[in-house]
Amino acid sequence: MNNLKKFLLFLGLIVLSSCFSISYGQQKDKKIEKSITSKESNAKTKLTTKKDTVVTKEIIEDDNNLDSIKIDLNLNFKFYKKNAHASYYAQKFHGKRTASGAKFDNTKYTAAHKKLPFGTKVRVTNESNGKSVIVEITDRGPFSKAREIDLSKKAFMDITSNKNSGMVIVKLEVLN
């Protein structure tokens, strides 16, 4: 999966080479360097981050139909809940309207939560393997007392170890 993310990042860089910006703060602690190389353009990009820093990639479309890649470093998350049960949306909800009014897309990083405001960014970490994703709250639910959050299928599959499971125990952290 990591190779897929690298490929998608460089595909975006190749297509959108005119608009690329990286913003980052000073790093004095232990640094992790990630080097990604594209065979097609021989382009090389280095991202240097702190060990606890999360790197997110967003492709944004502006008025001129140009895309740009935005990489945010040093995101501050506040602990919300530990030992929370997470599951994922069924495919039958793909394309339907959510409680926020947006169309649900099972291939995006979105989630449903009972209380958190729409638009809230939440880091969901699988407690058994340490994998995490950042999702945006776009819906209400889950409507079960046993579950705390419903993730899109893409987000759920990125953090689960067993692709056949329907639920994982996660830690929730909210972006400040």
Image (spheres, rainbow, N blue to C red):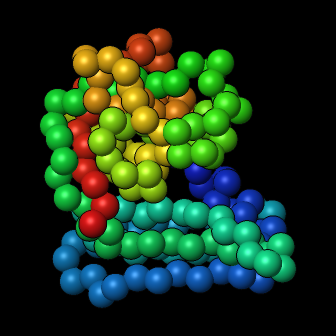
Position of 103 with respect to 86 (left or right) is right
Q: Nearer the viewer, residue 128 or 171?
A: 171
The quarter of the image holding the C terminus is bottom left
The answer to whether 23 is drawn above or below residue 108 in the figure is below
Residue 76 placement: quadrant: bottom left
**Residue 134, horizontal then vertical, whole percent:** 41, 50
* Residue lying at 32% horizontally and 17% vertically, measured from the top left: 144
Label tally: 0
Position of 156 with respect to 130 (left or right) is right
* Residue lying at 36% horizontally and 62% vertically, measured from the top left: 54
**Residue 75, horizontal then vertical, whole percent:** 32, 68
The residue most toward the right is 64
The answer to whether 105 is drawn above or below residue 38 in the figure is above
Q: Nearer the viewer, residue 112 or 29?
A: 112
Q: Nearer the viewer, residue 16 or 66?
A: 66
Residue 66 placement: quadrant: bottom right
* Residue lying at 48% horizontally and 39% vertically, measured from the top left: 139
The quarter of the image holding the N terminus is top right
Residue 50 visible (yes or no): yes
**Residue 111, horizontal then vertical, whole percent:** 45, 39
Position of 97 with respect to 53 (left or right) is right
The residue most toward the top is 164
Residue 41 visible (yes or no): no
Q: Nearer the viewer, residue 58 or 139?
A: 139
The answer to whether 28 is drawn above or below residue 84 in the figure is below
* Residue lying at 22% horizontally and 72% vertically, measured from the top left: 30
